[in-house]
Image (cartoon, rainbow, N blue to C red):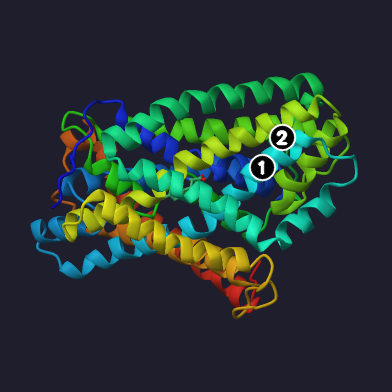
Amino acid sequence: MASQSSQWNNNTAFLLAATGSAVGLGNIWGFPYKAGENGGGLFVLLYIFFVITLGFPVFMAEVFIGKKGKSNPVSSIETLAKKSKSSSKWSIVGYGGILASLIIAGYYAVIAGFVINYGFISATGLEAGAAAAVYEAEKANFWEMTFWFSLFLFASGFVVANGIDKGIDKAMRFLLPMLFVLVIAMVGYGAVAGDFSSGLNYLFSWKAEDFSAGTIQAAIGQAFFSMSIGMGTLMAFGSYMPSNQKVSKASAVVVTADTGVALLAGLAIFPLALGLGFSPNAGDTLVFVTMTEVFAQLGSVGQFVGPLFYFLLAVAAFSSMISILEPSVAYLTQKHSMTRAKASTYVVAFCFLLSLISVAGHNVWSTVSIGALDNPFEAMKYFADDFLLLLVGTGMSIFVGWRLEKVVDADTMGINNKNLMSLWVFVLKVISPIFLMVIWTLGNLQILFDIRFF
Ligand code: PFF
């Protein structure tokens, strides 16, 4: 029995759900550390440039497929392929998205579990200088990591099982306002207690020598991941859009909010880290080691601000995790006529197994390398983020640009200007596939075979 509603019951639900999806660990954990690793301002500039020129057009393509196909990622593509007399094999793009979302769910839950754990750790008040050792100890603890990610994964599964209105929409209405208040509060605190002008300077000034192929790849990959492109989430959420909602306007709101929060996260973290004398280029341990150290140095104030910061991260991660589970749940309910409860149970169970592998990658299997990748956690992250995501993004871009040219309509898109519409289709047809595939090839050659061109 597939008895779920297939449309949001109001016009703000898509905006909230897609923003909740987009704003996540990618913004508050990923964006600042990647900016830190890639020299700050240049990365930020490239990131914004790619959000506008490539991300936004492909984002709209994904939402369009969902809205027009009115179903899960696979069925939507099948319906539209039929309508445009294209091969039904295009559905492989939808399957690719679902696969990516499941793998991401598997490692995302583990990082989110870490975040919750750190909320408690920072509340107990660490001694200055202890953060690095604490991080190593936490990473080594298989069962503790398993406990925290399970909590997070089951709670997300519970929301999704409750349906799109009573589960997802209801949760987003509560989570998103909280998220915005928390991020603003953190920026405010950073401005008062840290060195705001150094933080601002770090985020927005740049040196020509920072420019490399790696920076471009990092900026594009981060933009796509942050906007939740290429995993079927936007297709699933787009399929629930009421008919009078326009794809272009709704997408613009979500993309702007997502970019805004990424910048705000940088403005919350860098002034504090720089103000207390820490380097912001610690890589993916920036929020776990550097920031924990920052909170430790702040003494008793840190015992309050630290948990607040990790709570912000947890809220952002939770609203994203819900959205990561939705494409496969939608697929199972709509294509295989399962109830939402059953579909959610299957999906959560599968993700649980993947998360166990991902936890093991931090400890018991930390030296089990897979090809050029250090451990199973890194391998999962690589396969979903660097390999599948841009591939699915390219597939959607080509499908809409080349196969659906006659299906795209100004009314669904909400684009009345003919030139703008042609520009969008042109970007999907030519610019984004070429650019994404060049970046994809260069990135994979570098990661898998250590071959670099510039
Ligand atoms: N956009 C989310 C973030 O920035 O953390 C991550 C994400 C959510 C990826 C949903 C994929 C997805 F389907």
Q: Position of residue 1 (x, y in %)?
A: 13, 52
Q: Name which of mark 1 and mark 2 comes first in the sequence.
A: 1
Return the residue at label 2.
269
Tell me, yes or no, whether the two marked residues, 1 and 2, touch with CB atoms within 8 Å: yes
Q: Is residue 83 visible?
A: yes
Q: Which residue matches tag 1?
A: 32
Local secondary structure at mark 1 = helix
Residue drawn at the location 50% of the way across and 70% of the way down: 441
Horizontal placement of 181 versus 209: left or right? left
Which of the 4 image quarters holds residue 204? top right
Q: Residues within 10 Å of mark 2 (few under 14, many from 20)?
A: many
Q: CA distance from mark 1 to mark 2?
A: 7 Å
Residue pictured at 52% horizontal, 42% vertical: 317
Q: Identify the amino acid type marked 1.
A: Pro
Residue drawn 46% across the image and 29% down it? 175
Q: Is residue 70 placed above or below 248 in the rendered structure?
A: below
